[in-house]
Every structure is written in C-alpha cells, then in structure tokens.
C-alpha cells in the first residue's frame, strides 16, 4: 500500500477519505509567500521559539522548565520524521508560539493573583477510556450537571486568559478566547469537513483537557496530529508527573477565570490518562475514576480514522497502513497500562461502564454512576435530556471508518486485544446492536 501523494490517491479497499483541496491551496500560498519574503520560513528550533515568544509577549518567565525536555524531543522528531508540508510546518510554528505565549501569560497571572495557585481541586471525577469509547458523551452528560466544573472548548484551546482579562471580569471588554476558538474551528472544518462527524464541538461545548497537556509539550494530541514515532516512544517511557502538575495549575487558573467555587469537583477526561494513571493519581490522589469500555474493533478503527483525518493535513507522505499499525499498537499499550495501574486503585474509587450499556439505556447507566459518586441524579436530569436532544441532529452525519481501510483485520485486533474483551465482558459491536434492538422492542 503506497503513501498518498497530495492526500488524494485511493487505495484498493474501503480506503480512508481523501484530503480536501483546501490544504493544497494553503500549501501553494505559503510557498509563494516564503518565496517573496512575506511569510517566514519554518524554524523549529527550541531556543529561537522561546526567544520569539518572550520578545513578542515582553515577558521571560515560562514557569517550571520541565516542559523543555519533551519540547526538544518533539521538535527533533518533527524535523526528522514528520515530513511536514508547508501548511504543516507553518501551523506547527503557530502552535508552538501560542503555547509558549500562554505559558508566559500564565506565570504573569500566578504572580498577579497568588490566590489562584491556592485553589483546591477536590475529588475530581476522571473518565478513563480508550479513544472513541464513549468518553465524550459521558463527559458532556456529567458536564450538564452544574454541581461539577468542566472545561469548555475555547478553554482547552486557550486555557490562559489574555493580560486584559480583568477588564473582561469587570464587564468592560469581551473575552477574545471564544472568538479565536470559533475562527480556529472554522478553519479546521474548511481543511477537513469530517471534523464535525468525528468530534462534534463548538467554542462553549464541554471539552477534554488535552490542550492543557500540550502546554507541557506532552501527550497524544501530538501523536494524532503528526507522524513522530521517536517522540511517542520517548513519552511512553518517561514519567508524566510534571505535565500533570502543570495541568493542575492551569485547571486552577481556568476555575479562577470562570469565577466558580473551588469546591465544585472537576469532570476530566482524555485518553492520555490511560497511559499515565500513576502520575494522575500522584497529583489527584482523591480522584474518582470512571472506566469506559468498547469493542476494540471499533476503538482501533475509529482512532485510526481520527488520526488519519488530522495527519493528512500536515504531510504528503501518510500511509494508512502505518496509521493503522500505530493506533493498534497505541491502543494495546493504553489498555495494558490501564489494567496494570488498576491493581493499585481501591475498588470503591472506580466504576466500569460499557459503551453499549450507555447506548442501550443511558438513564440506567447514569443512575449507576451517580450512585457511585454518592449524588442524587434528579437535579441533573433536565440538563442531560437537553444535551441528548441537542445532539440528535449530529447523528445524521455518522463517523464512517473500517479496519480494512487501515490495513488491519478483525482477527488481528481480536488476537491482540481478546483478553481485554473477555476480562471486562465487552460485547462485540454486532452483539451490542442485537441487544439494543431487543431493548427497543421491549420498550415499545
């Protein structure tokens, strides 16, 4: 199976979708701009990126230097392995500049308001599951309960308020972060219209905290965006505690900017937690954990599709079979790390939720979760029903994918992840479909 030149070739069987013409146009514009000197050439050098951010922001304190080592590894992997196109290296430079500027502004806020770092983060509820295992749906159902705090999309894109944010709090200025998020999402949909079916969102939608890991140059957002195997391997073999400690401080800053009580527990979720549960529990020792499970056939296929639809934007040299192998390997590692970490977690601190159970009877599943959390569900019910009603329209645009399109077979996935499905009694997608049909018939 050959690499896809320009992202528009086809493969023989149920291949993944082609890239839209938008990126080809962007590549030509950026090349022309660089030729005449209107657009700066790509420069993914750590010291120069740090210097530029400090110069533009007029600040020089980036906070805990822990992030600089993963940044060095990430930049080297980008230069040597990612084979970025002009749009890819241009967007990478913009991303690094924004992350570094946010770090400078964060330190300014911590100094200006020391009380931010004194905010408690009591008993967070952490949803832990593989990519595409129903974590977003569960997260948004819980986020509809005002007894919890949650991130919004514009905050995971821009967790740090701009230096003029006190004027926003005083009602004298609009917070620019939702505006920026809306612009970024518009460009993302132009580049890839499938974004809406893969991960529906909007600036104010509840969102995972993956962007807070990016602030430490850590995590799977980079893996799903670029082909960077050396960086991935490095992260998988290093302790993530520094990234989690900085994430906790950014959560404190987000909570302060939302002007909500610090006694409200946070609802957190990102697949990154599957790899780094020991670090998470060091930083949040009283966390309550909700583990989600879904047929690995669907998890691997959907994760590969998500990564494919992002990676083809940034490189002309993307092989779907490579993407398939990587996300099968990554999913297998995530599950193994999760299972190992669970051995040291008290049983009363965690609960397991099946994807098909939520599909079949969401209310009964949520009642079981609320019993685990020690809360009455009734006050949250109206908000949950409102979210589910609003999300119905999005089901008209299903996310379509296949294992075969990424060079994988159902037998290979079953062989490598069969023990996981047996241990947690995870039904196949076909079995889950039959169970849903029986439930619907009995409810009529």
Image (cartoon, rainbow, N blue to C red):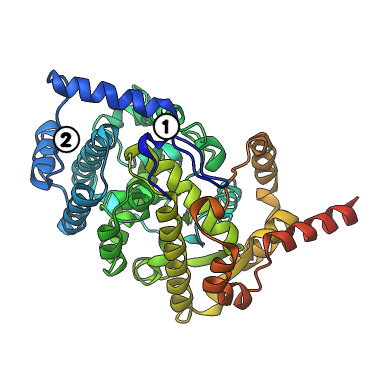
State the residue in front, 243 or 415: 415
x and y percent of residue 280 in the render? Answer: 38, 66
User: How far apart are the two marked residues, 2 and 1, measured between alpha carbons?
Assistant: 21 Å
Q: As displayed, is residue 172 above or below residue 11? A: above
Give how far across and how far down residue 325 sits, in percent. Answer: 43, 60
Q: Nearer the viewer, mark 2 or mark 1?
A: 2
Helix, strand or loop under label 2:
loop
Answer with mark 2 or mark 1, whichever residue precedes in sequence.
2
Which of the 4 image quadrants contains residue 98? top left
**Residue under pointer 1:** 188
Residue 24 locus on image (x, y percent): 35, 27
Number of numbered discs visible in the structure rendering: 2
Mark 1 falls on what kind of element?
helix
Q: Which mark is residue 42?
A: 2
Extreme residue toward the bottom, this view: 343
Relative to 361, is 348 above or below?
below
Q: Residue at x 24, y 51 (%)?
A: 81
Picture layout, residue 37 above or below residue 139: above
Q: Residue at x 47, y 81 (%)?
A: 343
Query: Which mark is drawn over residue 356?
Result: none
């Amino acid at each position: 199976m050959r690499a896809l030149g320009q992202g528009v070739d086809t493969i023989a069987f149920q291949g993944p979708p082609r890239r839209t013409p938008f990126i080809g146009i962007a590549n030509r514009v950026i090349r022309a701009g660089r030729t005449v000197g209107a657009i700066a050439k790509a420069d993914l050098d750590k010291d120069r990126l740090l210097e530029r951010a400090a110069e533009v922001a007029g600040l020089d304190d980036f906070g805990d230097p822990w992030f600089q080592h993963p940044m060095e590894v990430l930049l080297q992997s980008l230069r040597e392995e990612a084979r970025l196109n002009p749009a890819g290296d241009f967007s990478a430079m913009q991303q690094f500049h924004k992350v570094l500027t946010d770090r400078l502004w964060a330190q300014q806020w911590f100094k200006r308001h020391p009380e931010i770092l004194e905010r408690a983060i009591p008993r967070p509820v952490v949803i832990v599951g593989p990519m595409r295992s129903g974590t977003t749906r569960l997260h948004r159902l819980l986020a509809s309960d005002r007894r919890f705090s949650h991130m919004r999309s514009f905050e995971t894109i821009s967790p740090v308020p701009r230096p003029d944010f006190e004027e926003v709090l005083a009602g004298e200025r609009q917070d620019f972060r939702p505006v920026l998020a809306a612009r970024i999402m518009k460009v993302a949909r132009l580049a890839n219209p499938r974004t809406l079916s893969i991960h529906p969102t909007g600036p104010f939608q509840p969102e995972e905290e993956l962007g807070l890991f990016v602030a430490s140059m850590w995590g799977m957002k980079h893996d799903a965006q670029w082909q960077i195997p050396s960086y991935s391997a490095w992260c998988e073999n290093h302790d993530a505690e520094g990234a989690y400690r900085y994430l906790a401080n950014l959560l404190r800053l987000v909570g302060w900017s939302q002007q909500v009580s610090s006694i409200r527990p946070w609802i957190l979720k990102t697949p990154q937690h599957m790899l780094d549960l020991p670090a998470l529990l060091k930083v949040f020792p009283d966390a309550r954990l909700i583990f989600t499970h879904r047929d690995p056939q669907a998890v691997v296929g959907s994760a590969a599709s998500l990564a494919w639809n992002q990676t083809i934007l940034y490189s002309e040299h993307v092989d779907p079979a490579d993407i398939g192998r990587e996300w099968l390997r990554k999913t297998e590692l995530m599950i193994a790390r999760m299972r190992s970490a669970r051995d040291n977690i008290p049983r009363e601190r965690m609960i397991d939720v099946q994807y098909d159970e939520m599909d079949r009877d969401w209310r009964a599943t949520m009642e079981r979760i609320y019993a685990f959390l020690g809360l009455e569900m009734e006050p949250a019910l109206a908000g949950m029903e409102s979210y589910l009603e609003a999300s119905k329209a999005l089901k008209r645009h299903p996310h379509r994918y296949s294992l075969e399109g990424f060079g994988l077979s159902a037998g290979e996935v079953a062989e490598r992840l069969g023990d996981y499905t047996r241990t947690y009694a995870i039904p196949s997608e076909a079995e889950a479909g039959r169970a849903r049909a029986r439930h619907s018939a009995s409810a009529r």
